[in-house]
């Protein structure tokens, strides 16, 4: 009886129930493929790749059904009623159980997104630490080339999953609070969009069982051959894109229709403007990445062998098939705007936090808001700079070079605004402010190295070298990772009602910032010296000898590896700090930062119904230091 109760208790946890449903769906997909092949008269009724494709689709559906993400919709189809009520769906259960089950409160969903994103960032970072250990010395140490390349791909996509999901965490938790709304426009869709990510993550992790060694960009023709692991990657990314589309639709509807009385668009917090631009990119461009990976899935020989990316010559020598560069165009038409999906929310966090800790108005508020939309627009016109070495017209290179350099204009607006906000301010330097300033410095490194790759002449030399890796990591760490950590520390008192340990927070920062600078500048240096990306071994004499009897590239790779371990250790300090402080940290109070943003005008932690009385906005969002600028008046019940 006790065993039965334990099983019942375990299956009452939504996540466990969903995983059981996913694996049941995968097995059902396997069985369905075997049945179809048997009925079709195949000699071999088992085929691994079609089985995984059907199993991946049915597994994701099985997860969503089993966890209950579609239960209300099923009830509507049957003519039932499902009134929306704020609060736990299963009263009497432990509080922690809400975070492992379907919940319609945007604050719970935001934490689900945020914690999942942080876990995926740690998983992606773990793969980086492994293959960085391999690269610390020339020669093969413990990884074979195929395994190394698989780890490269897993590092890329696990980290990108973490970024996408982490952005969802910030957006879901903060946007409704910042505009004075009690929830998102479509709460059920909000929960559904989050839980799609979990079966996608499971598929990505299962792909490790196989070797898929085409890198994170999975260019054909390499990705059209090889193991069935590619199919698991394709469909996991397809599901992630589906989640992004639904989440962005929800955010746009929320910001346009659910703002507090008196909050015009140009009274919204700047983070909401950043999320508006981000959501418009996701809503309009994500279909391209989904289509790209769907086409790859269908183009593999073991599925339907559709020749989207494989040239097929007829008797006259004319290509009547596909073109490998077609994938590059569809991939980068989304994936370069996706860079702004990753960094625009982080730049919004920087603009949000600087006025709080400078105690003065945000310089050029409207220009910053418009610059986010401008970056989103221009981002659709620059994808070709990833393809300067591909086979397209040389005349197009000039267009893509100029359009890429133009991105510096709206980005420069943000930098000058940040400098104007800092100038003459009464600065304080708690951990969130340190990470904000660190983000500016690191993003500046990424921005200054960008024109080198945007210019055709230099890009032809540096394409696919470690210089690209250094630039990319500086852009992502400065545009997302550092701001993400700043946001975690800043809103931690609002979420938990307790303060984090300031000494541990600053230790995290002062370990991470110099280690990252050393890592990124080191990557750029070895790239200029000729180190290619995505290779497991290198010439020990590359870059010349040093007085340590090691090649220049080899000694820099050792320093990069040490930096990676220091960054990983600093993040472990943060995780300990957050979990420990949530239990024993000092009580924070409602507004420890003296912020003017709506979410800081209500108790900490935030009650179930965020705004029992609506706020009427009467002042500007960033009039810090101006005693005659009111912000809110209490509304009627």
Image (cartoon, grey):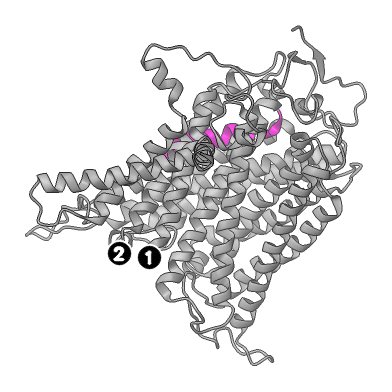
Tell whether label 1 touches label 2 (CB within 8 Å).
Answer: yes
Q: Can see residue 272?
A: no
Q: Is residue 535 above or below residue 614?
A: below
Q: Which mark is residue 43?
A: none
| 483 and 507: which is toward the camera | 507
Magenta part, dominant SS: helix
Q: Quarter of the image holding residue 508?
A: bottom right
Residue sticking out furthest to the top = 636
Disc with the residue nearer the chain's start (2 vs 1): 1
Which residues lie in the magenta part?
269-287
Q: Quarter of the image holding residue 168?
A: top right
Q: Is residue 173 above or below residue 416?
A: above
Where disc 2 sits, the SS reads: loop
| 368 and 246: which is toward the camera | 246
Residue pictured at 69% horizontal, 17% vertical: 260
Residue pictured at 64% horizontal, 49% vertical: 479
Query: Image check: 77 left or right of 577?
Result: left
Query: Image check: 168 left or right of 60?
Result: right
Identify the residue under disc 2: 226
Q: Residues within 10 Å of mark 1 (few under 14, many from 20)?
A: some
Residue 279 among those drawn in magenta: yes
Count of numbered circles in the view: 2
| 408 and 241: which is toward the camera | 241
Identify the residue under disc 1: 211
Instruction: Determine the CA span between mark 2 and mark 1.
Output: 8 Å
Pick the quarter of the image with the C terminus. top right
Residue 394 image point, x, y percent: 38, 58
Q: Can see residue 177?
A: yes
Residue 196 image point, x, y percent: 46, 38
Residue 131 among those drawn in magenta: no
Q: Quarter of the image holding residue 540?
A: bottom right
């Amino acid at each position: 009886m006790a065993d039965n109760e334990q099983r019942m208790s375990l299956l009452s946890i939504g996540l466990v129930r969903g995983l059981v449903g996913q694996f049941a769906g995968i097995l059902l997909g396997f069985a369905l493929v075997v049945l179809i092949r048997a009925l079709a008269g195949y000699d071999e009724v088992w085929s691994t790749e079609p089985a995984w494709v059907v199993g991946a689709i049915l597994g994701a559906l099985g997860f969503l059904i089993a966890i209950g993400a579609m239960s209300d919709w099923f009830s509507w189809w049957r003519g039932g009623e499902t009134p929306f009520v704020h609060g736990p769906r299963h009263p009497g259960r432990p509080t922690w159980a809400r975070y492992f089950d379907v919940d319609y409160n945007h604050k719970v969903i935001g934490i689900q997104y945020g914690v999942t994103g942080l876990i995926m960032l740690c998983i992606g970072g773990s793969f980086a630490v492994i293959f960085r250990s391999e690269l610390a010395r020339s020669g093969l140490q413990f990884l074979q080339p195929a395994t190394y390349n698989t780890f490269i791909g897993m590092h890329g996509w696990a980290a990108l999953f973490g970024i996408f999901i982490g952005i969802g965490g910030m957006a879901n938790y903060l946007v409704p609070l910042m505009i004075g709304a009690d929830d998102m426009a479509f709460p059920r869709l909000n929960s559904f969009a989050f839980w799609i990510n979990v079966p996608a993550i499971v598929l990505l992790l299962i792909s490790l069982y196989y070797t898929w060694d085409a890198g994170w960009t999975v260019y054909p023709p390499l990705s059209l051959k090889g193991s069935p692991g590619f199919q698991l990657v394709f469909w996991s990314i397809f599901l992630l894109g589906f989640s992004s589309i639904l989440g962005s639709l929800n955010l746009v509807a929320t910001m346009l229709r659910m703002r507090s009385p008196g909050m015009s668009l140009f009274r919204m917090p700047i983070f909401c403007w950043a999320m508006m631009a981000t959501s418009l990119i996701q809503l309009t461009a994500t279909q391209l990445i989904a289509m790209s990976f769907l086409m790859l899935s269908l183009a593999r020989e073991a599925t339907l062998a559709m020749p989207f990316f494989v040239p097929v010559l007829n008797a006259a020598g004319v290509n009547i098939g596909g073109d490998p560069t077609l994938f590059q165009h569809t991939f980068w038409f989304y994936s370069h705007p996706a860079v702004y999906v990753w960094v625009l929310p982080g730049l919004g966090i920087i603009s949000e936090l600087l006025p709080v800790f400078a105690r003065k108005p945000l310089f050029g508020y409207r220009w910053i808001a418009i610059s986010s939309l401008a970056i989103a627009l221009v981002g659709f016109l620059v994808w070709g700079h990833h393809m300067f070495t591909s086979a397209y017209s040389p005349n197009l290179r000039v267009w893509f070079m100029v359009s890429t350099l133009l991105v510096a204009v709206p980005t420069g607006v943000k930098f000058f605004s940040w400098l104007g906000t800092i100038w003459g301010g009464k600065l304080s330097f708690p951990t969130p402010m340190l990470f904000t300033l660190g983000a500016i410095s690191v993003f500046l490194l990424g921005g200054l190295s960008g024109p080198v790759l945007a210019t055709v002449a230099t890009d032809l030399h540096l394409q696919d070298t470690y210089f690209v890796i250094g630039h990319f990591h500086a852009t992502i760490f400065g545009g997302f990772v550092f701001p993400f950590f700043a946001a975690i520390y800043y809103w931690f008192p609002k979420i938990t009602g307790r303060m984090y340990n300031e000494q541990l927070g600053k230790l995290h920062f002062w370990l991470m910032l110099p280690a990252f600078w050393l890592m990124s500048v080191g990557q750029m240096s070895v790239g200029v010296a000729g180190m290619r990306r995505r290779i497991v071994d290198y010439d020990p004499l590359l870059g010349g000898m040093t007085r340590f009897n090691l090649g220049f590239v080899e000694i820099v790779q050792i320093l990069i590896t040490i930096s990676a371990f220091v960054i990983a250790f600093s993040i472990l300090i943060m995780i300990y700090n957050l979990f420990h402080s949530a239990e024993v940290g000092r009580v924070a109070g409602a507004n420890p930062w003296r912020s003017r943003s709506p979410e800081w005008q209500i108790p900490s932690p935030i009650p179930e119904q965020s705004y029992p009385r609506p706020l009427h906005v009467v002042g500007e969002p960033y009039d810090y230091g101006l005693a005659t600028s009111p912000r809110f008046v209490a509304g009627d019940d």
